[in-house]
Image (spheres, rainbow, N blue to C red):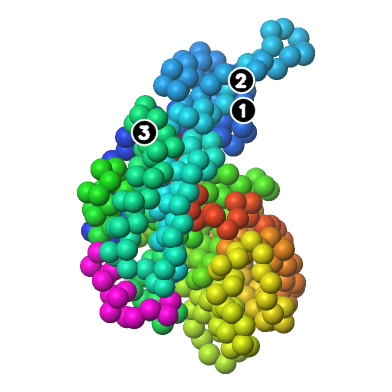
Amino acid sequence: MNTESAFQLPSQKAPTLLDSRSANERDILTLIRQRSSLPKAEIAQLTGLSAQSATVIIKKLEADGLVRRLEPIKGGVGQPKVPFGLNESGAFGIGLKVGRRSFDMTLLDLKGNVRATLHEKFAYPTVSNLLTFAKRAFNVLIKNLDTDQQRLIRGLGVAMPFEIWSWAEEAGAPKNELEEWREFNPQAALEDLLSLPVFIKNDAGAACSAEMSFGNSQNYNSFLYIFVGTFLGGGLVLNNQLVNGKTGNAGAVGSLPFYNGSTQSQLITQSSLYLLERKLNDAGHNGQHIYESPSHWSCDTRSIEDWLSETARGLAFATQCAMSLLDLDGVIIDGAIPDDVKNALVAHTQSAMKTLDMRGLAQVHISEGLVGRKAQSIGSANLALQANYY
């Protein structure tokens, strides 16, 4: 099992696990999370454990408050089967998402329910604003838990763009302000501030973690995850495990080289939301609208349609690369965009795939992500839970 789910900068140490579980316990918790509930006999069958071993482990997980008995399943021969499900109040994770124009802090329970969230907007992210927000938001969110539940917080997950200082132009921020991030150690600073282990991952990778845990309607075992946010990003899942890579940046589709017909640049400059913002501004509209109303866009439809076509070309290229290298079950597309726009983007990407030479490759399945625009925030809060239990 992958017990190291946090993004590691060279200066970071491995975060402390407050409730690390054995491989068999993790297997059982993962199965129950994926299936919602399972009786002991099926757990033993699916894990390959003996009935006695499965019973011992489930009793331990139940005593520790991580799983609970559900209503018996009546019918059939013999005694009713008693399924076990996750106990939503058995553990909690706190997540901090660092975005281009906002911070989000989220309180998540073991079943993936958002218990509380706090959002703050700004012109661009600074280190001092991050620390101020983190302390204030944490104190607000933990008020939703009683004293015993607060002891069950397993850590702070942080979802943030990799190398923030490299994107001053795209972020519309003063370069000197973002340079401060280069020497900043968020893990050490936030651990000192909140007295919790801190797990850091790039923002799109954290979103992939959320989709793997709480979405993936097609039940892909291996997939490329693409998140269309202010900056394009992604994540990679192989054999139901989130792949981190040497520096925690596996699946960084935004960094793929892309030739647009005249110049070669990174895919982030072809298929990101900031490009739509610019299109709208250039057309005399309010580009900020797409961030202020992420669930419904009421803006220039021609600009949106042009952006969809251009973005889909980039996503189709990323899909072709992934299928060529990894022969995946499929590709999942999500983003900080309205559902109708996401539907259209998937359709445009499927159409763009028809223009590519896919000879020698398996047919690709492209589906929509279920977690949605809050995937990065939910994924950040899930990092500590994933590290301890899955």
x, y percentage for residue 160? Answer: 40, 61
Image quarter of residue 373: bottom right
Q: Are marks 2 and 3 in contact (CB under 8 Å)?
A: no
- What segment carries the magenta color? 171-184
Give amino acid for label 2.
Answer: Leu
Q: Residues within 10 Å of mark 3 (few under 14, many from 20)?
A: some
Q: Earlier in the sequence, mark 2 or mark 1?
A: 1
Question: Which disc number belongs to residue 22?
Answer: none
Q: Are marks 2 and 1 in contact (CB under 8 Å)?
A: yes
- Which residue is at the far top? 78
Question: Which disc number belongs to residue 150?
Answer: 3
Report which residue position mark 1 lands on: 37
Give amino acid for label 3.
Answer: Gln
Report which residue position mark 2 lands on: 70
* 165 relative to 93, above or below: below
Give amino acid for label 1.
Answer: Ser
Q: How far apart are labels 3 and 1 at the CA level?
A: 26 Å
Frontmost of labels 2 and 3 is: 3
